[in-house]
Amino acid sequence: MGPTFPSTDIFAPPPTDITAAHEPQREGRMTQSQRLQNKTALVTGASRGIGRGIALRLAQDGALVVVHYATNEAAAEETVALIEKRGGRAFSVRARLGRPGAEESLFATMESELEERCGNAALNILVNNAARTGFDGARPDEVTEEALDQCYLVNAKSPFLLAQRALVRMPAGGRIINMSSGMTRSAFPSQISYAMSKGAMEQITLHLAAHVAPREITVNTVAPGVTNNGDPVFDDPESLAAMSNLSAFKRVGEPSDIADIVAFIASDESRWITGSFIDASGGTLLGTKI
Ligand SMILES: NC(=O)c1ccc[n+]([C@@H]2O[C@H](COP(=O)([O-])OP(=O)(O)OC[C@H]3O[C@@H](n4cnc5c(N)ncnc54)[C@H](OP(=O)(O)O)[C@@H]3O)[C@@H](O)[C@H]2O)c1
């Protein structure tokens, strides 16, 4: 007798709205145990958006989280307060990445605070999340040299310098997680400078992963698709519908969708994954048209 198949068409669209079906599931999920207890994590750009989601999630798993920000101190303190309200541990550090000496100064401030709180300054997890994301929407023939330089400084050079600095003391089992974008795999001509800088960042993952594997440290790239970072564009129904349509699941991502993936990569459970590009785009890169 041959294999049996479900009587319904498994390729048919679902009977209910996927977004609605998704929400209760997420809310009802069991929380992970404190799998990052005694770990420290630096999340750059954690004042808002995806970075805030990642900071909250890693703190929920027990890590002491360093909430880095560039300009928005109030938002960064709000992230810290949210973590503490949920029983987690966090403190904020300011640094305008891409400026000379910024990465060194971030580490100096962070390490003295870690020393005070933990008795040592080792960093276990670095999430390179901060980015110049304000899309200028410039066509390739309109991209300015200055815009290109800014993208490279913040999105590629700075994550490398932070990783280099973190590795000085990172213990075995450490994690470097580079936040890239689906735009390195799908063409958006008006975002060419951003995509070029993220492509460069992905090279950090590839080459550092091989370099630090003997120390049992992993380096991976997580690449979100369109994710609601609180920008007003997500409140516009027409734009939201167009953005939702890009994903195979027909909705935009939420910071928690990305944070759950980062939390797995940050945990010991991901120890056999390194040098990987993890597509966190909700199937956007499948290119589904219907
Ligand atoms: N949202 C998406 O649809 C999407 C899609 C694909 C990939 N991603 C990637 O996911 C990550 C987070 O994106 P997001 O949309 O959540 O970002 P966002 O809301 O624009 O937040 C950016 C964060 O980076 C910080 N930042 C910006 N420039 C900085 C600089 N020069 N120095 C230091 N910090 C700086 C900001 O700090 P202040 O607020 O304090 O200035 C803020 O915390 C980025 O790497 C982005 O490329 C996002």
Image (cartoon, grey):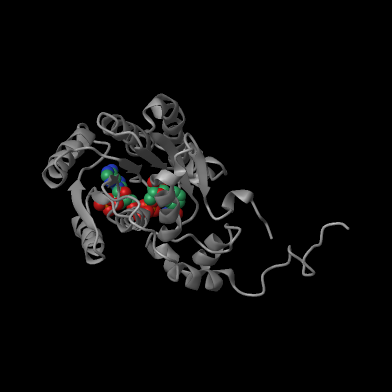
Of all residues shown, which one is farthest toward the right? 1
Q: Position of residue 114 (x, y in %)?
A: 16, 43
- Residue at (36, 58) in percent of width and height: 33
Front residue (pair 70, 50) = 50
Against 204, is 249 above or below?
A: below
- Residue at (48, 46) in percent of width and height: 223
- Residue at (48, 59) in percent of width and height: 253
- Residue at (45, 40) in percent of width and height: 221
Front residue (pair 95, 145) = 95
Against 94, is 255 above or below?
A: below
Q: Can residue 135 be seen in this snapshot?
A: no
Q: Position of residue 117 (x, y in %)?
A: 14, 47
**Which quadrant would the C terminus be assigned to in this image?**
bottom right
**Which quadrant would the N terminus be assigned to in this image?**
bottom right
Of all residues shown, which one is farthest toward the front? 1
Q: Quarter of the image holding residue 59?
A: bottom left
Using residue 117 as the reference point, say whether residue 31 is left or right of it: right
